[in-house]
Image (spheres, rainbow, N blue to C red):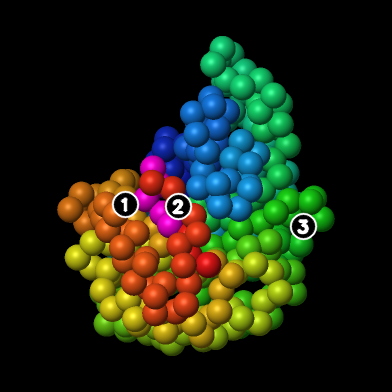
Amino acid sequence: MSLNKKQVEKLESSGYRFVGSHNHAAAKICHWTKQSILDKGVCYKEKFYGIESHRCLQMAPAVPNCQQKCEFCWRDLSYTQTQWEGEYDDPKTIIDEAVKAQNNLLCGFFGNDKANKEKLEESKTPTNAAISLAGEPMLYPEIDELIAEFNRRNFTTFVVSNGQCVDKLKNLENEPYQLYLSLDAPTKKIYNDVCRPQISEGWDNLNQSLDTLASFNSRTCIRTTCVKGRNMTNPEKYAELIKKASPDFVEIKAYMCVGSSRHRLTPDNMPTFDEVKSFAQKIGENCGKKIVNESEVSRVVLLQ
């Protein structure tokens, strides 16, 4: 079931641009894309992995769809649908229109004297797709072909999944450049309390996906959003889960009290950078990984 007109209008007022004709795919300019064009800093992904922030397309093929209603999610969860219903747009249409929407959203920078003109020109042809804007991308019926189409266009792709679509992950024929699995709880109880799965087998699905991660040929990453007072406990349990997934990278990142998450959590739930770093060190000590990079402004550290 697609989003209704009122829901679409609300999201577009916050910067989303829906593409295609079925209101399930969208693009939105990332804060760091704008900052990079103004030479005011770059996303931590550029610092960690070399991705050019000004050429990054932040998008989602399944905006309304997710099997979880995480406490820390900055999105409005009132429209969340756990299963795909109805028609959908094809990958080529989604990509073509997402790039066009991104260009339209950035066109105002051409009148800004502070904008880096070379970066602006390059931004017209994005080279990385951050498939992580909203919703669970693996629920999009043609996610495999979407990744393949991005690959054919020489994009790098960063796909962020909650690990609930186990069979789709196992049978993915076209691997992204980097596959993320969100690991936001060390135990089933904390997972149920913080990630609030809308399906009964959520914790089991996540664990099966963690087991599957090691079989990927692409780069893999575990991402943990740290919510103070909620899931920053049992670092040795996180380490156990990370070890069985055997990822190339682990990102430990602070929850930020923004968007609709402000109705569920408070600024007191935001850990400081030092708290994130200390927690990451404890996890790393238990799984044989070390902090190799960090971004204090984004409150994130990279373990490898």
Q: Residue furthest right?
A: 152
Sort mark 1 into few (<14), some (14-19) or many (20+) by Cα contacts within 10 Å: some
Q: Nearer the viewer, mark 3 or mark 2?
A: 2
Examine the rendering and report whether any part of residue 78 can be seen.
Answer: no
Q: Residue at x 57, y 20 (%)?
A: 115
Residue tagged by mark 3? 151
Q: Position of residue 173 (x, y in %)?
A: 75, 74
Sort mark 3 into few (<14), some (14-19) or many (20+) by Cα contacts within 10 Å: some
Q: Residue at x 31, y 46 (%)?
A: 258
Sort mark 2 into few (<14), some (14-19) or many (20+) by Cα contacts within 10 Å: many
The answer to whether the residues at label 1 and label 2 have Cβ atoms under 8 Å apart is yes
Question: Magenta segment range?
Answer: 297-301
For the residue pair 85 and 97, the one nearer the viewer reads as: 97
Examine the rendering and report whether any part of residue 15 can be seen.
Answer: yes
Residue tagged by mark 1? 273
- Mark 1 or mark 2: whose residue is earlier in sequence: 1
Image height of 261 relative to 216, above or below: above
Q: CA distance from mark 3 to mark 2?
A: 28 Å
Identify the disc placed on residue 294: 2
For the residue pair 252 and 210, the one nearer the viewer reads as: 252
